[in-house]
């Protein structure tokens, strides 16, 4: 507990000092760095109320500082309106409605309030307080730098057998396991994340960020740092043993190559060559991947059962939601899945479904088809907006939009692999959604002011959502 208190005071103090010294907007990259850094275990438990995590303390501080100092944009105010504000309000309203009809109303209302505070509030602050394209660039660097630190922790976890989570008090959660636990895939890197697959998800998001930063890097020292960090992240994502994260990374890099330009394609070609060299020099790496693939195809193995479990979840969701039209529309209430006591046949036996390794199933069961469609629309609009502008803009802004598009799609893909709307990677997702929607207009303003993030001379109307 003393460590948690020290971490909280230190993080809050650093953020406050930075805001007073540099101003609110210029401190947002530091806030992004800190929000991604700390584990769920860094919390003060308040029985009967909310767990006061380090992230929540930082968000409370951000709200106070934003109200006091952050609501200015060149002395006039932030962006004209909050992007997708109608959909955000609709989602919150629907979650409250679903909570009112929940099988566990108190749990659902607490879950709704937690998600609004944890994710909608940072989304609002980052979308409203940023007035410069340069700030968006720095926030991406902050996320990447935070993942670089966490990748170092992942390295020590795998090669030294020491986990940073061992310093914090145990905080049970849905996927809790002991730090350094040996699983069916050996010792898997986790860093400060809830699970290895969540760490892998964040790495699959951070690697494209690093490649974008490399396209804008000027100094040799910065390029050396970025390449070293990217290669370390490749090592860590391999060591997570997460099949979903591997596929997400491959798909994201393939999209970057397909839609990217110039230096981005050259860097990806370099990565392909380096990967081929590793597979030749270290054939055991290729054998591990092949063996894991074969085990996944065999339902009698732990890996195969884990893979088939996700399909069984869809079957359970379809069975339960089809029983009642109302539940199909609004679900059983936020965070109600674990109170339903669902049972069903899996691999010839009756199992109790106590885990939900799919955010898609979780959303369907908790908020029904309507809630799922609202979330899907939020993500789809942000992704489409980023992709469209990546094809209209000129470099480097086009590359920034392409990376944001790829990042959002990575999260969408991983929603089918894990329950992902909790933990520090969710702060990253909501902030990236905000950045994807405000960046094009900021970049256009920057180009007119001859700032580095030039995008050509398109009209604002052509970039409007």
Image (cartoon, helix red, strand yellow):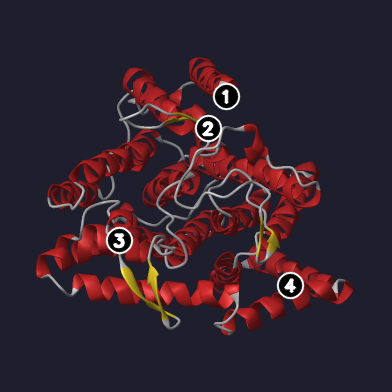
Q: Indicate the secondary structure of the residue bearing disc 1.
A: helix
Q: Quadrant for the N terminus, please.
A: top right
Q: For this view, does 148 lie left or right of residue 23?
A: right
Q: Is residue 300 something that shows in the picture? A: yes
Q: Mark 3 or mark 4: name the one nearer the start of the chain.
A: 4
Mark in the foreground, 2 or 1: 2
Q: CA distance from mark 3 to mark 1?
A: 37 Å
Q: Mark 2 or mark 3: name the one nearer the start of the chain.
A: 2
Mark in the foreground, 3 or 1: 3
Mark in the foreground, 1 or 4: 1
- Look at mark 4 in the image and give the residue it sits on: 272
Q: Residues within 10 Å of mark 1 (few under 14, many from 20)?
A: some
- Look at mark 2 in the image and give the residue it sits on: 42
Q: CA distance from mark 2 to mark 4?
A: 38 Å
Quadrant housing residue 70: top left
Quadrant housing residue 167: top right
Q: Quadrant for the C terminus, please.
A: bottom left
Mark in the foreground, 2 or 3: 3
Do labels 1 and 4 touch, CB within 8 Å? no
Indicate which disc residue 7 carries: 1
- Look at mark 3 in the image and give the residue it sits on: 341
């Amino acid at each position: 507990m003393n460590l948690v208190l020290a971490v909280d005071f230190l993080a809050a103090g650093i953020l406050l000092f930075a805001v007073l010294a540099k101003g609110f907007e210029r401190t947002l990259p530091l806030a992004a760095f800190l929000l991604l850094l700390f584990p769920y275990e860094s919390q003060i438990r308040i029985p009967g109320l909310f767990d006061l995590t380090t992230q929540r303390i930082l968000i409370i501080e951000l709200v106070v500082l934003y109200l006091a100092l952050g609501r200015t944009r060149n002395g006039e105010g932030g962006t004209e309106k909050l992007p997708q504000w109608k959909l955000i309000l609709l989602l919150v309203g629907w979650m409250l409605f679903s909570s009112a009809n929940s099988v566990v109303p108190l749990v659902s209302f607490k879950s709704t309030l937690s998600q609004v505070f944890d994710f909608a509030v940072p989304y609002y602050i980052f979308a409203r307080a940023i007035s410069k394209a340069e700030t968006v660039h720095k926030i991406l660097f902050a996320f990447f730098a935070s993942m670089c630190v966490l990748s170092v922790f992942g390295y020590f976890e795998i090669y030294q057998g020491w986990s940073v989570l061992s310093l914090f008090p145990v905080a049970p959660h849905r996927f809790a396991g002991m730090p350094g636990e040996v699983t069916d895939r050996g010792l898997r890197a986790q860093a400060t994340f809830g699970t290895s697959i969540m760490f892998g998800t964040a790495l699959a998001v951070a690697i494209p960020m690093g490649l974008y930063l490399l396209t804008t890097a000027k100094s040799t020292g910065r390029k050396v740092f970025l390449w070293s960090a990217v290669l370390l992240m490749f090592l860590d994502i391999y060591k997570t043993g997460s099949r979903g994260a591997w596929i997400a990374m491959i798909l994201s890099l393939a999209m970057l190559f397909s839609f990217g330009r110039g230096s981005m394609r050259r860097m990806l070609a370099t990565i392909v060559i380096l990967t081929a060299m590793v597979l030749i020099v270290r054939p055991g790496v290729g054998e591990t991947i092949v063996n894991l693939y074969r085990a996944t195809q065999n339902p009698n193995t732990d890996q195969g059962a884990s893979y088939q479990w996700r399909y069984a979840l869809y079957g359970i969701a379809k069975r339960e939601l089809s029983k009642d039209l109302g539940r199909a529309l609004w679900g059983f209430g936020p965070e109600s899945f674990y109170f339903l006591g669902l049972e069903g046949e899996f691999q010839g036996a009756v199992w109790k479904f106590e885990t939900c390794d799919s955010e898609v199933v979780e959303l369907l069961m908790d908020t029904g088809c309507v809630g799922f469609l609202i979330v899907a629309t939020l993500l789809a609009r942000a992704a489409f907006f980023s992709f469209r502008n990546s094809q209209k803009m000129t470099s480097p802004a086009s590359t920034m939009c392409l990376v944001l598009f790829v990042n959002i799609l990575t999260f969408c893909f991983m929603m089918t692999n894990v329950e992902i709307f909790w933990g520090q990677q969710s702060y990253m997702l909501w902030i990236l959604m905000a950045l994807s929607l405000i960046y094009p207009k900021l970049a256009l303003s920057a180009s007119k002011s001859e700032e580095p993030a030039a995008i050509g001379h398109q009209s604002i109307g052509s970039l409007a959502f």
